[in-house]
Image: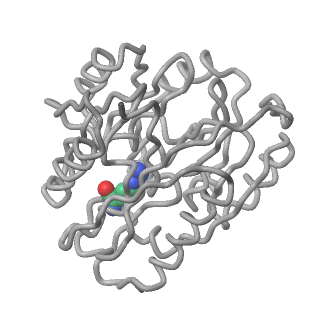
């Protein structure tokens, strides 16, 4: 069982990059959640996204926005745009042709925002969707999108140890659909999303982790954002929310079901900018 959180500890304000879903749609299917025949309510997606952005601000976090680009319906999932650690930017290189133009678009934003260490990646990787940064290690996934060679590329650039994990369930095609950080040294995850070997690695690294159920994972409950005190999580993940509350965390349920039609939740919409741009 995960240790209770220290609710007296100060929350460090975070800086997030988000992209308004102005051109959001499900026009192609690159994961099992997407059904182009089902249709989306774009105005509702925008309202839900604004709710998420405003919630972050009300919690004291800073939110910057990248301008959405017409014809890139998945650009709202900013977590895939890059990985930013200590102000160093490791750019994304998307696995699908449909999302490929997002890589340069995000790199451009970082250069214009004044980031000086901006790396164009050699290997396929979908940014923070497949890399989760903790205090001592960066957890990185492969299996559906990001190539293992990108883990080494990121490790060299960031100078932090990167631990490779293998995803095995196509519903949980990005690491951030199956695992999130509760703090710098604690995680919550759904073991069924990982290979047996990766489950062993996770058990060794985080013996006290919160283990989520398939029901929690199936509503993208693990696609959550935690600042160490507050957890922003899919409203449908009620059982997981209860267990997070029992640990002393403040739970903020968000309705993002319109964006879930593309296979994304709160975390997918959120790219954390760690470290200064100057
Ligand atoms: N439709 C998008 C895709 O399949 C969803 C991306 C969700 N992002 C994430 N960080 N899990 O690429």
Name the spot of residue 15 as percent of width and height, x first. 51, 45
Q: Tell me where residue 273 sits by quadrant.
A: top left
Q: Quadrant of ligand 1?
A: bottom left
Asked if residue 25 can be seen in this view, the reply is no
Name the spot of residue 152 as percent of width and height, x first. 28, 18
**Which quadrant of the figure contains the C terminus?**
top left
Which residue sits at x=15%, y=53%? 100
Which residue sits at x=24%, y=75%? 27
Q: Tell me where residue 252 sits by quadrant.
A: bottom right
Above or below: residue 219 compared with residue 24: above
Query: Count of labels shown?
Result: 0
Which residue sits at x=27%, y=70%? 73
Name the spot of residue 22 as percent of width and height, x first. 33, 76
Asked if residue 181 can be seen in this view, the reply is yes
Query: Toward the viewer: 218 or 93?
Result: 93
Above or below: residue 61 compared with residue 262: above
């Amino acid at each position: 069982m995960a240790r209770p959180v220290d609710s007296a500890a100060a929350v460090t304000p975070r800086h997030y990059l988000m992209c308004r879903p102005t051109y959001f749609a499900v026009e192609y299917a690159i994961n099992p959640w997407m059904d182009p025949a089902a249709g989306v309510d774009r105005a509702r997606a925008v309202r839900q996204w604004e709710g998420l952005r405003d919630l972050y601000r009300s919690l004291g976090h800073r939110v910057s926005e990248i301008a959405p680009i017409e014809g890139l319906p998945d650009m709202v999932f900013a977590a895939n745009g890059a990985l930013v650690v200590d102000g160093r930017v490791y750019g994304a290189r998307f696995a699908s042709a449909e999302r490929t133009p997002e890589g340069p678009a995000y790199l451009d934003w970082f250069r214009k925002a004044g980031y000086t260490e901006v790396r164009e990646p050699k290997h396929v990787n979908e940014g923070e969707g497949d890399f989760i940064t903790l205090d001592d290690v960066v957890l990185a996934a492969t299996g559906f999108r990001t190539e293992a060679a990108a883990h080494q590329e990121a490790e060299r650039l960031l100078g932090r140890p990167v631990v490779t994990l293998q995803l095995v369930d196509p519903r949980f095609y990005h690491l951030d659909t199956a695992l999130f950080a509760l703090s710098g040294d604690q995680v919550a995850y759904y073991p069924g999303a990982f290979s047996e070997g990766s489950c062993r690695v996770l058990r060794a690294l985080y013996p006290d982790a919160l283990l989520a159920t398939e029901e929690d994972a199936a509503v993208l409950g693990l696609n959550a954002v935690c600042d160490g005190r507050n957890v922003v999580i899919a409203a449908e993940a009620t059982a997981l929310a209860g267990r997070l509350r029992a640990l002393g965390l403040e739970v903020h349920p968000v309705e993002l079901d319109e964006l879930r039609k593309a296979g994304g939740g709160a975390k997918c919409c959120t790219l954390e900018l760690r470290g200064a741009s100057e």
